[in-house]
Image (spheres, rainbow, N blue to C red):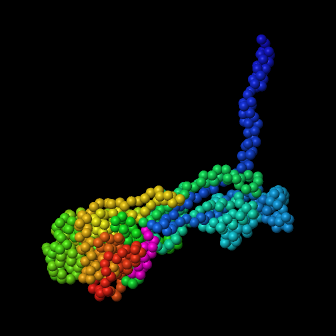
Amino acid sequence: MNPASTRRRCLFLCLIFVIGLSGLSARLVYLQVVKSSDYAKKSDRVSVRKELLKANRGCIVDINNQLVARNIPRARLALDKKLLHDIGPATLALANKELRETPEWHDWDERTRKRQIKARASKMKNEMQADVIIDKYIAHVINTFARPLGLHPLELRERMNLDNKKQKYVVLKQDISEDDADKLKQLTIDHSILHAFVFEETQKRWYVMPEMAAHIIGFVSHESKGMAGIESQMDSYMAGKDGYVKNHRDKFDLLAVAKPQEIRPPIHGLNVQLTIDMGLQAILEEELDAGLAEFQAIKGTIILMNPKTGEVMAMASRPTYNLNTRENIAENGYDFATQAIYEPGSTLKIISTAGAMDLGLVLPSTLVNCHYGNYRVGSVRVPDHHPYGMLSVEQVLAKSSNIGSYKIALQLGRERFFDYLADFGFGKKTGIRMAGESAGVTNDTGNPTDFSRNSYGYAISVTPLQVACAYSAIANGGTLMKPLLVKSIMANNGTTIMNNKPIPVRRVIKESTARKMRRALATVVDIKGTASRAHVDGFQVGGKTGTTVKINPDGGYLHGRYTVSFAGMLPAEDPAFVCVVVVDDPQTNEVKRYGGTIAAPIFAKVATRVANRLGLEPTEPIAPSQPLAQSDH
């Protein structure tokens, strides 16, 4: 076969092969070759804008589901400066402005308006130079939106920062209400300027009672990230996960409404229920403010705990700040209840007494020789408030004898004293859900003088919360409980996701010892004790006063300046709550600056109101008022 015949035969076979292509193969060829350019042209017509759908941060509620903190929807308006120089949208906006001022505008339907706008925009492109169009367009944007944004036109122009070519994106206004954002968005639609503006959905944290429990609740950043308190500690539960929507817009029909093509809904955060009762919190805040004002002090705290569960029912600290405005937060963000450390004084005398009772070394009736005002053995000298002579162990607590407490501690021994001190939770963080909690200082130096001072609450530093936890162990029968601030975590439909149950840390003393200690502490609030001003009508109160000279940061003590406290429980036999009051550096001269004259009466006012709110039945007959003894330490 000659070469020409061969070529003709190959061409014929190729033709037969092409004709024999399946319908599907032919369709593929058509799509890939013929229509591919059409699809490319169509995709060039579409612009995609991804808009964030913010997740709602979970609410915070109190133990009674009273709202404490929630998010309110807000918006942020930004400008894409790059789009300000897009001739197409600019001419449409100017055409829109011009035609809106004509008499015919109100007679046209929507379709006619769009057609007329497009026609006029097309003419403008031919009539004016591009830079003139852009200048007029920018002036139109400024004049249209300055007043609705609450700005002078010059101020808006300055915010747009038009001379900065590198900055493509600028925020014009933050924290816009939902209603105002809707009005602004409608304004951009009406004036065909929507393409250049970006409306970002944001949220603002709102605190219903912003000056209550501020240190507990905490706050969030502008990005809604928890920065302090429960807001920080529970951030991973409350934050949620943002979603988004992708809007497709036809670049050649900017007057058409954008169409959402892809939506990922946000996952909203969970709600947190506190153990705090805001009604009780209000009582503590009011009485703390009143007490600090009366006794001329700036710093202090009141803590209210359920001793059986470890739940913090309320906790107030001063100074404080407003959660919504956050004014003076740098100075007042320090939480006195969990971060302040101080020498507790006589409130710590429960350690040697409870330890010695628990080991059977003493009974409440065991007599202790407290000498007559001063006790010296070797290099150790222990001062006392009064010359007491012989006192029972119960009376040592009631009179708050330093010598008696030291002698009981000697029977217990230094090593076992520090063991009980640690078991009661001192020298360690309690583990409460609060950032920055202090552990206190409980060093065993081995020095006999230091040990003598440790026995009556000096040369040891504690936090008010540690004291509340220790007294709760006596109140509940001998078990140290972890303090709880979060009761449960709930979904938005009210379903409980997680319940926090009481967390026992360890048994500290026997139940029988705790019972003896409660009876002994009740004698402190007796008419002959140091805390007679802590008396509450209708109830037997147990507790202990504390008075210490303030430490000088430069060494030694600030004589004449004190930290005074009272740790109490009610009813003493089976306490429904423990309440600790600490007042730092009272300046009053109306009463002697002791725990019994300052902290104890504040406790009485708080306890009376708390008992009434909790509906506690009186356990004692209400006796006629008696003259109050002058309290000691």
Of 138 and 469, nearer the camera is 469
State the residue lying farthest toward the top.
1
Q: Residue at x 47, y 62 (%)?
A: 272
State the residue lying farthest toward the left.
378
**Residue 522 coordinates in the image, percent (x, y):** 27, 76
**Residue 466: in sight, yes or no?**
no
- The vertical placement of 37 against 247, above or below, is above
Instruction: Indicate left or right for 208 with 132 as reference.
Output: left
Quadrant (top left/top right/bottom left/bottom right) for the C terminus: bottom left
What are the residue bounds of the magenta stretch? Answer: 276-291
Quadrant (top left/top right/bottom left/bottom right) for the N terminus: top right
In the rendered image, which quarter is residue 23 located in?
top right
**Residue 580 coordinates in the image, percent (x, y):** 34, 73
- The vertical placement of 307 against 166, above or below, is below
Magenta portion: prevailing SS class: helix
- The vertical placement of 390 against 500, above or below, is below
